Image (tube, helix red, strand yellow):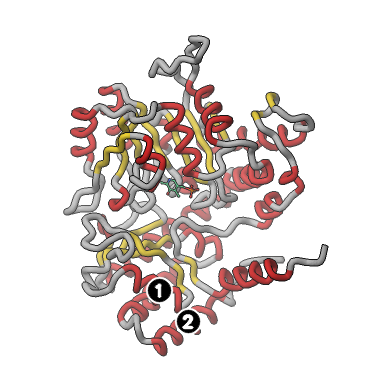
Amino acid sequence: MTRDTQIFDIIRQERERQTRGIELIASENYVSDQVMEAMGSVLTNKYAEGYPGKRYYGGCEVVDLSEKLAQERLKQMYSAEWVNVQPHSGAQANMAVFMACLNAGDKFLGLNLSHGGHLSHGSPVNFSGLMFHALEYNVREDDGLVDYEQLEQIARTERPRLIIAGASAYSREWHYERIRRVADEIGAIFMVDMAHPAGLIAAGLLKNPVKYAHIVTSTTHKTMRGPRGGVILMGKDFPNPWGKTTPKGEIKMMSQLLDSAVFPGVQGGPLEHVIAAKAVAFGEALQPSYVDYQKQVKLNAATMADALLKKGYKIISGGTDNHCMLVDLRTKFPELTGKVAERALVAADITSNKNMVPFDSRSAFQTSGLRFGTPAITTRGLKEDLMPWIVSLIDRVLSDPENEQNILKVRNEVNAEMTKYPLFAW
Ligand SMILES: *Cc1c(COP(=O)(O)O)cnc(C)c1O
């Protein structure tokens, strides 16, 4: 077959886009060449429905080895007793937990999407909100921190079967112990979705939720810096407390329920090429240099947040403990929407995303916020000394978002600086 120049030209364009700009999307990162190599390998040809040693297809002896290696490395990263590395994405991992722990229509409690939560924690357009009874807790209006009193009060009056901690736009550490206490009090399952801070947690820079939660889910492609995918972990297994009996009347362990929920519950064959790439990324996360990387991610974020505050921007909760921050634009630019701000920054080759802020006066399509994160630029090699410069560029663009000349000048500065930080070796 002749080379598909159409698609490979598009891939080249995307590679150029990634190379010339400053990437501030908090959920993105650049994987290593080895992670990329494993993803583009012959393992994509293999069907392997089932789990290592218990597959529905022949010829799985080799992929069994890489899936087992992925499992062992992931357990080591978080001191977990049990893991599943097959979820195709973070949302699939969450869906499997819902399937294993809840019946349709059951109540669960998660962080409000417009307060930093994720679609899969109860949004009315997501399976979680469509098939289950979603309850939500907020952050507090005055300090932007999770409203634990409200969470406890809703938990006690509504008695949800599942409580979820974790967020997509929350820059502070969590009081997992406190949520576990109320979960135990009402007999609920406590799940933590660590999709965003997973890499910082693996490096020991934030508390490890595997110690506090019954079940932990994550993505592998955000701060963790692996291929696009999801995982599920548990500290120790526990018998199913929900009386979800099998047709034969057996009591199932939670690990069995979760395994069956991933496959055949919500997925078919696993992506063994991605699982091998996950194993590579987990191996990288166990190297000492990974701790240095995550420390720099955190330092870059803290320095960026400081620089934003100095320029008069409001950051929800006043700063960051992790890799990300949520800016409420209304304080400095009451007329500027997140949508316009995002577009102006993209035109200057600075990529970020508009985001709802807690108690937002605008819709999800307009928004009053921007979310910034440092995992990608830190992988690229940018250090804290460059963070005030990045903030000054952002400020120049947002101060005059319709001025094309101004944006072009900023873009030229961005492009010139980024040539000093080569991204791809190949
Ligand atoms: C990103 C994210 C997910 C979903 O990940 P996908 O891989 O995009 O499905 C789930 N939960 C949280 C908290 C996230 O931030």
Mark 1: is the Cβ under 8 angstroms from ligand 1? no
Residue 20 position in % (x across, y down): 56, 75
Q: Give amino acid for label 1.
A: Arg
Give the farthest residue toward the bottom.
405
From the image, state whether disc 2 or disc 1 is nearer to you.
1
Please state, as top left, top right, bottom left or bottom right, where the N terminus lies in the image: bottom right
Q: What element carries label 1?
A: helix
Please state, as top left, top right, bottom left or bottom right, where the C terminus lies in the image: bottom right
Residue 411 got which mark? 2
Residue 298 position in % (x across, y down): 42, 56
Residue 53 position in % (x across, y down): 70, 25
Specify whether 59 is left or right of 130. right
Q: Give amino acid for label 2.
A: Arg
**Residue 76 in view of the camera:** no
Give the farthest residue toward the right.
1
Give the farthest residue toward the left.
142
Q: Residues within 10 Å of mark 2 (few under 14, many from 20)?
A: many
Q: Which residue is drawn at 51% across and 67% down?
A: 382
Q: What element carries label 2?
A: helix
Q: How far apart are marks 2 and 1 (CA)?
A: 13 Å
Q: Would you identify the image quadrant in which residue 400 lies?
A: bottom left
Q: Which of 387 and 324 is in front in this view?
A: 324
Q: Which of 420 and 149 is in front in this view?
A: 149
Q: Residue at x 52, y 49 (%)?
A: 224
Q: Which of 19 and 296 is in front in this view?
A: 19
Mark 2: is the Cβ under 8 angstroms from ligand 1? no
> Which comes before the other along the chain, label 2 or label 1?
1
Q: Would you identify the image quadrant in which residue 132 lies?
A: top left
**Residue 175 in view of the camera:** yes
Label 1 sits on residue: 343
Specify whether 189 is left or right of 360. right
